Amino acid sequence: MVETAMVKIGAPLGRRVSQDLWGLFLEDINYSLDGGLNADLVRNGDFEATPADSPTWGPLTGWEVSDPAAVRIRSDAPFAPANATYLRLVAGDQQSATASNRGYDESGMFVAPGRYRLHLAARAQEGQPRLRAHLRDHLGETNATTRVPVPADAYEWKWYEADLEVTSAGRRRLELEVEAGTLDVDLIELRPVDPATGTELLFRDDLVEALAELQPAFVRFPGGCLAHGYGLDNIYHWKHTIGPREHRRGMPNTWGYRQSMRIGYHEYFLLCERLGASPMPVVAAGVCCQNVPGGPQAIPQPRMPQYIQDVLDLIEYANGGVDTRWGAVRAAAGHPEPFGMRYLGLGNEDVVNDQFEDRFSQIFDVVQAAHPEVTVIGTLGPKPYGPDYDNGWSVARRHGVQMVDEHSYRTPRWLLQNVDRFEGYDRSGPAVYLGEWAARTSSVRSAVAEAAYMIGIERNSDIVKLASYAPLLARVGSTQWVPDLIYFTDEEVLPSANYHAAWMLARHRGDEVLGCRVEGGGERAQPRPSMREIELRSKGSTTRFAAIVVDGEPRAEATTAPDGGVARVAGVIADGRAVEMRLTATREGGSEGFIVGFGDPESGTMHEWRVGEWRNRGLTLSRRDDDITDEVDGPHRFEGVQTGVDTDIRIRIDGARIQAWLDDQLIHDHNDDQRPAPELVVGATRRGNETLVTVVAPSDAPRQIQITGEGITSGVRALTTTLAGAEPEAGAPFTTSPVTPRAGEITAADDCLEFVAPPWSVTTLTIAPPTSSCGSVP
């Protein structure tokens, strides 16, 4: 029997929906730019890769040469100091010299039929060198070839270009061949040419189209962690990313690869313009990333005035008239009109301490005085709880910050438990930007939970003004973080189930929030912490667990291997009693810590104490629901597990309370969240004369939905879009979604709209006069 839920749509609540609510966060993680949005197919075309980017990299990363003796890596007389490394190809009288590039895939760069434009800098050195370019397949067969018109007497660096006509799709390598002389080459690009305009593409069109489908109101850039960098020398400097290619200064990427800066700030602004989105640059708040050895470091005070001026210059570049210094630079780059920047992020996931507040306040005060029209967004640290979160709110209130950036990478169950999180926020401000959030996986379970959470965000968008999922893009095979909204290869765009849920709600945004009462929605109770089973793991080390005692009863010792395998220990059924576990852990080899898990596997919930998490530097208490893990307390600073040194562990649970001691020092004292998770979440807004209803069913069973209320009379149509049809665990990183939105239509009878919400589904309804239309489904 299918249970019935009653939904009553009421009058407006007096809350306007922020029209900037849904946006994008674009960070160069997962090869999102070079190898992704950047349409250039050549990897390391500037020969600037070094071991600072990745330990095994060097100037020829991405390149193969025919004869090492015919190739020289040079830096003595470069095209420009910002790109000092170049390639010298020395061809003999009887033999050519070649260098070939496979792009970002070992099997070669993918090309489709059409024209491709080769762009490079070159300089003749000796003889009368001739340069040709070829596209060859894995068998060495030539599929396209062209002569690059470098004059034999061209002894100064100049730009050259030539087109290659591709007639069949496939994987290719770009080969540069020099004959009869010596030639220097640098800054090599190969881009598809737009057949309509004859100009080479800056961005990869299919990825831009996927972003445009989300109708973003803003785009945040360049980070994230990328903005404040891995150390002071790695802070992202916007001025190094604009102007001619040869003057842009690439740098090692926080995520373990190199940024060419070919997609720099000017191109970012162009992308925002193409998407119809407002730019939201994020700059470091005068400190670098907290995860560097020694912790966050502040820009020295004597350098702060220059750094603050750089921030002011960025605003002027975006918004200044052509009669201003940096507005004139923008105009010289081909864009005299201002870009209309309205937001500026200041800081990202920082340790919010006195050092941070000092640097933040210096920048904030000057920017606010000079540009009151720009909303400066503060930061609340990496988690929706903890000292940085609390201190971030205090700093924002002390300094009158208008908006703060909250981050929530959490489990699907946490998102469901927190659908009403923002109802309790102080409406007097600051407002909230939910800058980075996701439900941990690319599964249907996560997508549905995210849709439910988005309803809670929209319902409270009088205080939560902006939100963006993160990360946005991930190249298959070159990914540092999952989950991601959109996966891609050279040939394909692979949207996740999360993408489709975001697409549905982004296109279903209203103008004002309506009241909405749900009866019979159901809820999922949360199991209390348990020690029915103990799990011991030590990925990255070998650990012996001895003197194990659970509820006063000894257990056999166990040893875990660095492969992450689990040793299971019998626990006890507490039946409401307080229960305690003790053990001694000794690392016998390796460099990491260990994990002590406890719970009832049948409930779907386990807790884990991670001793020596994140490079053996932290102590974190986590909760695992449906095989997806969240931190619930910590991380707390830790000197680390030492080989051969005993670590005494004591864990006690009493109802919802969990306490954990390390060597008799209390580390965690946590009350587990016991709020039930709803099995039906409904939101309603009004847009003109349309009523928009979103029904999210994070439930294992279908549910009959009956909707009544304002605007729902017999005969009224509702155009529907439904995301459903797969098990909650379906969907995985690097694959396309197992479900896609489907369009439909229902008609009200007896002043009631009725339909069945499938298990683990998202349904949007547009209730409108007969002349209205919902648009199309991608």
Image (spheres, grey):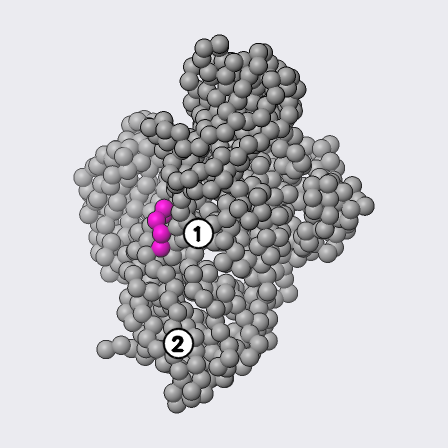
Rendered image quadrant of residue 260:
top right
Q: Is residue 734 magenta?
A: yes
- Magenta residues (range): 733-737
Which residue is at 56% across, 61% downward?
21
Q: Disc 1 marks which residue?
A: 485
The residue at the point 55 percent across, 49 percent down is 196
How far from the left and from the top, in percent, is residue 500?
A: 42, 59
| Secondary structure mainly formed by the magenta segment | loop
Q: Is residue 666 above or below residue 96?
A: below
Horizontal and vertical percent for residue 414?
40, 58
Residue 98 against residue 769 in the figure, above or below: above
Label 1 and label 2: CA atoms lie apart by 28 Å
Q: Which residue is mark 2?
A: 745
Identity of the amino acid at label 2?
Answer: Glu
* Residue depicted at 38% across the width and 36% down the height: 171
Query: Judging from the image, what secondary structure is the residue with disc 2 in?
Result: strand
Judged from this view, the residue extending furthest toward the right is: 323
The residue mark sitting in front, 1 or 2, is: 2
Q: Is residue 324 left or right of residue 624?
A: right
**Element class at badge 1:** loop
Give, as a three-letter code, the residue at label 1.
Leu
Residue 54 point in image, percent of width and height:
46, 28
Estimate how packed mark 1 is, as few (under 14), some (14 to 19) or many (20 or more) residues with alpha carbons within 10 Å: many
CB within 8 Å, label 1 to label 2: no
The answer to which of marks 1 and 2 sits earlier in the sequence is: 1
Q: Quadrant of residue 504?
A: bottom left
> Is 413 situated above or below 53?
below
Q: Which mark is residue 100?
A: none
Q: Residues within 10 Å of mark 2 (few under 14, many from 20)?
A: few
